[in-house]
Image (cartoon, rainbow, N blue to C red):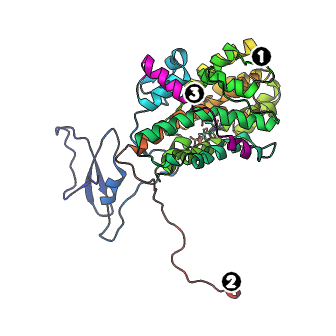
Amino acid sequence: MDSAIPMTQPKTTDSSSARRDTLTITDNRTAKTYEVPITNDTIRANDLRKIRVDESDFGMMSYDPAFNNTASCISRITYIDGDKGILRYRGYPIEELAEKSTYLETAYLLVHCELPTESQLKEWQHHVTHHTFIHESIKKFLDGFHYDAHPMGMLISTIAALSTFYPDAKHIFDPESRKKQIYRLIGKMPTIAAFSYRHTLGMPYVYPDNDLSYPGNFLNMLFRTSETRYRPNPTLEKALDVLFILHADHEQNCSANTIRGVGSSHVDPFCASAAATAALYGPLHGGANEEALRMLMEIGSVQKVPEFIKRVKAGETRLMGFGHRIYKNYDPRARIIKRIAYEVFDLMGKNPLLEIALECERIALEDEYFVKRKLYPNVDFYTGLIYQSMGFPMTMFPVLFAIPRMSGWVAQWEEMLLDAEQKIARPRQIYLGHDTRSYVPMEQRS
Ligand code: ACO
């Protein structure tokens, strides 16, 4: 919709005139005035294109590297108020879901917009559970990875490879096909993740046990050794389930934007999810939990925290697990995670790095550098400590983030596909490179 209306006369400010939901822009280059509609506190970037110096002018654009102030979609999935520290999935506060829901129920909510009835939940659990097995050939190419391959690399590649096993996935506008791929993606994530982990240990793969819960089965596939039937510890099973709920979605973050962007080319959801998983791997996104723990280990003792904070303030390094593009307040997930940490430590013994983490947090919450920049602990600050206490190696931390995020990704992907306003994602650029110049033969180059 291009709805900027060029006005012949500059608009005069009349306080008595009725409120209009428009923005008046005066282009001082031409003295022309434009009235642009405002909807949901937003103007459409395309409306700026009417603002031109002359007929040959391309028209005005907005410049917003890293999408600091650009809405790329209309969404009804997740709401965040970063200043107040609010996070809701489909309107339900994260605190209530963490206390009362399960990960699979929350995944249903994200994908289907509403909490399920009892029979809907049973059916959903049945379908997800019955898509946990992976093709035997996948085991063969997992075997091809080097023994020290990072499990995120294995996970990304295997998710992409699923596209070759399920060619029906390319029928992205067939609702039945989409439903099936969503079962497959949510169902197979723990299996691929656990198999990648077992591969790095040189341990035999453990097949899914469909009588266990989603997190319980994951623990089974990771840690079962010689027992005939693996019984997950209920505290750890519950802790993992809550962590999965907290990580299920987070609106338009880097990986959600990736699945929307890649998916907008209409590639199948396995390839699009592999791209989202790759985005999550980065240390500024889902890889931050691994980096946060490495940082705590590097600091080494509570006494060395002030020295480390000094280095952070000097710009030599970052306090990993701190800061967020959206939250300028305590990340509500970090609050819940801190509580879970103590429950896990009661069972497994206190993680010795906890004291270092608490000291970093204490200093940072009082220090002007962090206070001024509104840097608070994010979801990744305490998760690493919990995962380590549960027996996970650090390389598995981003994997533990990726497993539950799949439900958010597929919800974002489907919403994008069904949004009539969406097209292939294609940003503009401001070209400041050379103008045309002629090719210079090698002997004439200096
Ligand atoms: N430690 C020290 N200083 C920081 C940190 C940090 N963790 N985060 C931001 N800052 C500082 C920056 O140096 C900058 O300071 P300046 O204004 O003096 O230049 C200011 O705070 C703003 O930082 P930006 O990088 O512009 O903020 P942005 O919104 O782009 O980045 C990000 C957000 C990437 C999360 C950043 O805070 C960061 O790198 N944190 C550490 C990594 C991390 O924990 N990532 C996980 C995020 S949560 C998630 O993805 C699940």
Q: Amino acid at mark 1?
A: Lys
Q: Disc 1 to disc 2, how far (Cα)?
A: 65 Å
- Residue assigned mark 1: 350
Q: Closer to the camera: disc 1 or disc 2?
A: 1
Locate residue 80, reporting x and y percent.
47, 30
Determine the residue positioned at 42% across, 30% down: 112
Q: Amino acid at mark 2?
A: Arg
Give the numbered dot on residue 129. 3
Q: Which element carries disc 1, helix, strand or loop? A: loop
Query: Farthest top residue?
Result: 346
Is the Cβ of the residue at disc 1 closer than 8 Å to that at disc 3? no
Give percent across and percent down for residue 225: 80, 24
What SS does tag 3 mark? helix
118 magenta-colored: yes
Mark 3: few/some/many CA within 10 Å (<14, 14-19, 20+): many
The residues bearing labels 1 and 3 have C-alpha atoms spaced at a distance of 34 Å
Secondary structure mostly seen in the magenta stretch: helix
Q: Position of residue 170 (x, y in %)?
A: 49, 49
- Is 262 on the left or on the right of 341, as rendered? left
